[in-house]
Image (cartoon, rainbow, N blue to C red):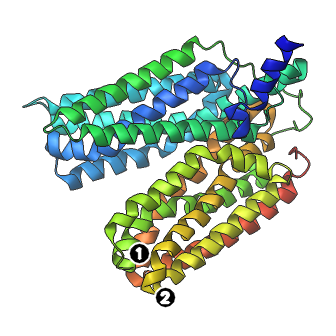
Amino acid sequence: MRRSSLPEKSRRFSIPRMLGLPSVRGHVPLVTALGIDAVGTGLAGPLVLLYLSTVAGLPIATAGIVVTSAGVISLAVPAVSALISGRVGPKAIVIFALVLQGAGTGGLLLAAVPGGPVLPVVIGCCLLNAVGGRAFWSSVFALIADAADSAEAAARVEPAAEGGARTGKEAWFALSGVTQGVGYTLGALIAGALLIIPGTLPYLIALTVNAASFLVAALLLARDPGHPRPEPGSDQQDHPHTGVHRDWPYLVLIGANTLFAFCSTILSVGLPLYVVQGLNAPAWLIGPLLALNTVLGATCQGIAVRVTRRFRRIRVLVFAGLLWAGWGIATAALGLAPVWLLVPALFCSVLLYSVAELTHAPVSMGLASDAAPTAVRASYLSWFQYSFALATIAAPGAFAVTFAVDPALPWLITTAVAGLGSAGILLAGRGLAERIRE
């Protein structure tokens, strides 16, 4: 009795269980690879433009155009991933994507060689990074969904293996978000510490470590035994499919999530400018405000899943949309707030946004995964990533144009976008009702 009670007690009070996250038993290589990739990206990602301008010697405008153009070209990647995912599987695509990014990031070091062909090297490497990054995000969620299905099957065979922890897809997507959020934050902190060192060495170290992190993550996944995908028809939600382009409920889901992704993107894009120029608030507030959002995102996704799991996912997403709508109105109204109220109101605004983001992120991926036909889930999830890609492209321009008209206008437009997203989710939910598990 004494031997069995101790493990039971340790499982009961385990940190993953407390945070609403699943056990990683049997999936350590996957989770470790995600964490290593995130640390490397957080370390070098924020320094790339600085490296290209200060070390490689490119004009900042040229560097920005190269990076942006590579991102636009990479928009074709999710469609290609969708076409080949059924043949090679998401794991192979993710490994290939990591290798591409490792080569692209490592190749950027050549731009620091005096007298070398800087611009061609930068163009080629940025293109490799953009294509690899887009391929990674197009397929990694299908890989996580496969791991979730594997864990769920193991829990049915051996319930004690999971210690009662939730093994649904939302919990796994939350685990992914937490792992990547913590890793990215850690990498960014290391980058800040490196910048204390004068000269070009911090940039060279950051790029080298990032390139190595991509390759180590790829090696871990290559050595991972893998998680067999369910056979077509093995799940009650499976149904005949003719391709995502003819699946109107899923297309509506993608459209609605594009609107929600716009709401999710607009904070990091617009808040710094709004704080400084729109509200005439101290610039030092930007760091703590964004840090609050980052910390909550990196620690509370599993808790959000645990709190909302008793509700239907469509309702949870509508609730997230309504929260974003309220956040847009509240943020627009900050311009009317008295000076003494501005700082606490800004933190409350970011907190409201963060709750909406925490509510939306894992549930939207869980819904997108379960709504896809099992046989072509990886293909469907590749197309689903267009919602985030399009929002990332649209948000900066939309914010800049509307902010020039009036500082409050972008946030009021965000409210309207969130309302349309909620309506779109309700419409998609009607068409998907027969195939999604609640």
Q: Amino acid at mark 1?
A: Val
Image location (x, y in percent) of residue 63: 24, 48
Q: Residue furthest front?
A: 2
Please say whether residue 370 is visible from this viewpoint.
Answer: yes
Q: Which residue occupies 74% across, 43% down?
A: 366
Report the amino acid beneath label 2: Leu
Q: Position of residue 338 (x, y in %)?
A: 46, 87
Q: Quadrant of residue 125?
A: top left
Q: Is residue 397 left or right of residue 376?
A: left
**Quarter containing the N terminus:** top right
* Observer-nearest of 238 and 284: 284
- Mark on residue 401? 1
Mark 1 neighbour class, 10 Å CA radius: few under 14, some 14 to 19, many 20 or more: few
Question: Relative to the observer, which residue lies in front, 206 or 77?
Answer: 206
| Helix, strand or loop for disc 2 | helix
Q: Is residue 120 left or right of residue 147?
A: left
Tell me the residue at 23%/31% (across/down): 204
Q: Which residue is mark 2?
A: 336
| Residue sitting at the far left | 115
